[in-house]
């Protein structure tokens, strides 16, 4: 039966939220309990499936694997499902920990968002067929098993001095001006239970604390885009909030949950990354580009796999499936993407071991499938020199990243790779192969001068006719 308290709470919500709550409350009325974590685990896309006929946790809403982390930083865009993820995990933690802390930027935020909001504890408990007891005057939530969560405002870090906890959830900590004090006081008291740890759910802003925390080896930072939660958001939210940020630099922070700092010396920067909606079926030609691990003398053992296509003069990046694969694994992935996008070719970097790469691809053609066309890409020039003309195409707004695709890791690599420093960027390499094949921006001088760009000699010694890209990028 619908709980009067829940009904009263829902009355205060926006009409839009009420509508979505009504559907879920109907389920409660029918006596259905909605599980959040399903048996598909982190592979699940959160859409309904057998045994779970309602939306539930996506893989990116599961806690990071392993137990060697101290902080889980869910760095997400607006409406990406951050608060819901924090509330669901806290509810689960109540089974294991008897004292927990809930912290929001203000006291009102704790109440209105973390506890009584559309994604708050009361609502997620109700969906799970549980009733929690909230006593605002005592700043306390009591779970059916007696576990207690105490609420704190980020404005009053001193209150965190003293009490002990076994777990803490902070919603929007990047927006707490006193976060350093909040965290140091919290951590002193975080010593109950077997494995005290913290969940941070926030849109990031590039403060010292956020940067330091996300970089900490004991932190697992998970980036979630607003678009990945599209199914659970109202179209009105997309028309108003999302459209206002789309394609802007701020959008990277507000929609993708990305830290905005541009890295000095990186080839790409946030200003030249442009997003656009595109239906892959409308594209003229699509390729799956692979930079297999171990074939170049790369330090990384990851294989870059990027799908991109062209429409007229523009290229669209559709999919990044890079990761750690066995040779059979990347070949199979490439074939499945080839099939999924009805691609025209697989472009593979074959620098060291051309025959081997070709053979791995051919050997793993799914039974019954027509062998794909394989385009062998050979690197005759260095990575940076190869990437520069592709960067120029981004600057000319001729390469777009498809809205709705999860390209966050690829973009991160693009925005942070400084040629000559750091790890060999496998995703970027695959991207460069894809765009180079689609738009053939080589030799760079020709493509660029044809579009009226400067053809000053590059700052890279030994290269003539390559425009000085650095002046354009800054
Ligand atoms: N996996 C999911 N299945 C069903 N609903 C979901 C899922 N994830 C999030 N939601 C719903 O999506 C909506 C937005 O989620 P939530 O409030 O957690 O986002 P947020 O990132 O905290 O947003 P904000 O930026 O406004 O703080 C809520 O109605 C929430 O219940
Ligand atoms: Mg939220
Ligand atoms: Zn599932």
Image: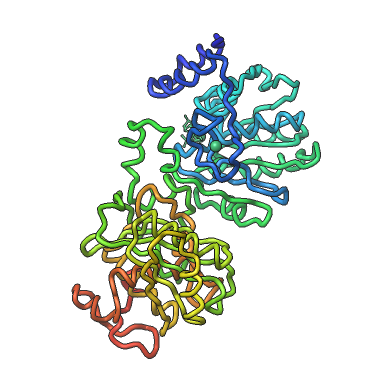
Q: Please count the marks in the image.
A: 0
Q: Is residue 323 left or right of residue 345?
A: right
| Quadrant assignment, res 456 | bottom left
Counting from the top left corner in percent of width and height, residue 386 is at 39, 77
Figure quadrant of the C terminus: bottom left
Q: Is residue 406 above or below residue 309?
A: above
Closer to the camera in the image, 306 or 396: 306
Q: Nearer the viewer, residue 364 or 187?
A: 364
Q: In this rendering, does residue 450 appear at all?
A: yes
- In this orientation, does residue 134 appear? no
Q: Position of residue 295 (x, y in %)?
A: 53, 77
Q: Residue at x 32, y 35 (%)?
A: 240
Relative height, residue 309 to residue 467 (above, below): above
Residue 12 lies left or right of residue 5; in this view the side is left
Q: Which quadrant of the rendered structure holds the N terminus?
A: top right
Rendered image coloring scheme: rainbow
């Amino acid at each position: 039966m619908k709980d009067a308290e829940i009904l009263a709470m829902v009355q205060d919500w926006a009409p839009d939220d009420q509508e979505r709550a009504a559907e879920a409350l109907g389920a409660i009325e029918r006596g259905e309990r909605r599980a959040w974590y399903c048996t598909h685990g982190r592979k699940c896309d959160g859409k309904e499936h057998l045994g779970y006929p309602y939306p539930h946790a996506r893989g990116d809403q599961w806690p990071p694997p392993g137990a060697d982390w101290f902080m889980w930083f869910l760095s997400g865009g607006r409406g990406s499902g951050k608060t819901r993820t924090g509330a669901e995990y806290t509810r689960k933690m109540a089974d294991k920990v008897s004292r927990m802390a809930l912290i929001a930027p203000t006291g009102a935020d704790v109440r209105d968002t973390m506890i009584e909001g559309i994604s708050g504890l009361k609502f997620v408990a109700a969906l799970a067929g549980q009733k929690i007891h909230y006593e605002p005057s005592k700043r306390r939530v009591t779970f059916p098993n007696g576990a207690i969560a105490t609420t704190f405002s980020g404005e009053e870090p001193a209150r965190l001095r003293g009490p002990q906890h076994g777990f803490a959830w902070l919603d929007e900590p990047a927006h707490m001006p006193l976060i350093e004090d909040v965290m140091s006081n919290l951590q002193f008291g975080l010593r109950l239970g077997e494995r005290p740890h913290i969940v941070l759910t926030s849109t990031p802003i590039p403060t010292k604390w956020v940067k330091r925390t996300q970089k900490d080896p004991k932190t697992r930072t998970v980036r979630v885009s607003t678009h990945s939660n599209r199914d659970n958001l109202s179209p009105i939210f997309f028309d108003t909030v999302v459209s206002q940020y789309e394609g802007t630099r701020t959008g990277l922070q507000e929609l993708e949950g990305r830290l905005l700092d541009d890295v000095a010396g990186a080839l790409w920067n946030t200003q030249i990354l442009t997003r656009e909606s595109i239906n892959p079926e409308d594209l003229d030609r699509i390729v799956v580009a692979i930079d297999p691990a171990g074939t170049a003398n790369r330090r990384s053992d990851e294989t870059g796999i990027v799908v991109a296509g062209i429409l007229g003069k523009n290229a669209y990046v559709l999919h990044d499936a890079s990761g750690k694969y066995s040779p059979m694994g990347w070949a199979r992935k490439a074939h499945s993407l080839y099939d999924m996008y009805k691609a025209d070719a697989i472009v593979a970097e074959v620098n060291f071991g051309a025959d081997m790469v070709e053979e791995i691809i051919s050997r793993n053609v799914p039974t019954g499938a027509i062998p794909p066309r394989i385009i062998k890409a050979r690197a005759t020039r260095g990575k940076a020199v190869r990437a520069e003309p592709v960067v120029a195409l981004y600057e000319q707004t001729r390469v777009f990243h498809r809205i709705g695709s999860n390209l966050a890791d690829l973009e991160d690599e693009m925005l942070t790779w400084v040629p000559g420093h750091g790890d060999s960027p496998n995703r970027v390499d695959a991207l460069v192969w894809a765009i180079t094949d689609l738009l053939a921006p080589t030799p760079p001088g020709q493509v660029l001068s044809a579009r009226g760009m400067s053809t000053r000699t590059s700052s890279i010694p030994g290269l003539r006719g390559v425009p000085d890209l650095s002046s354009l990028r800054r």
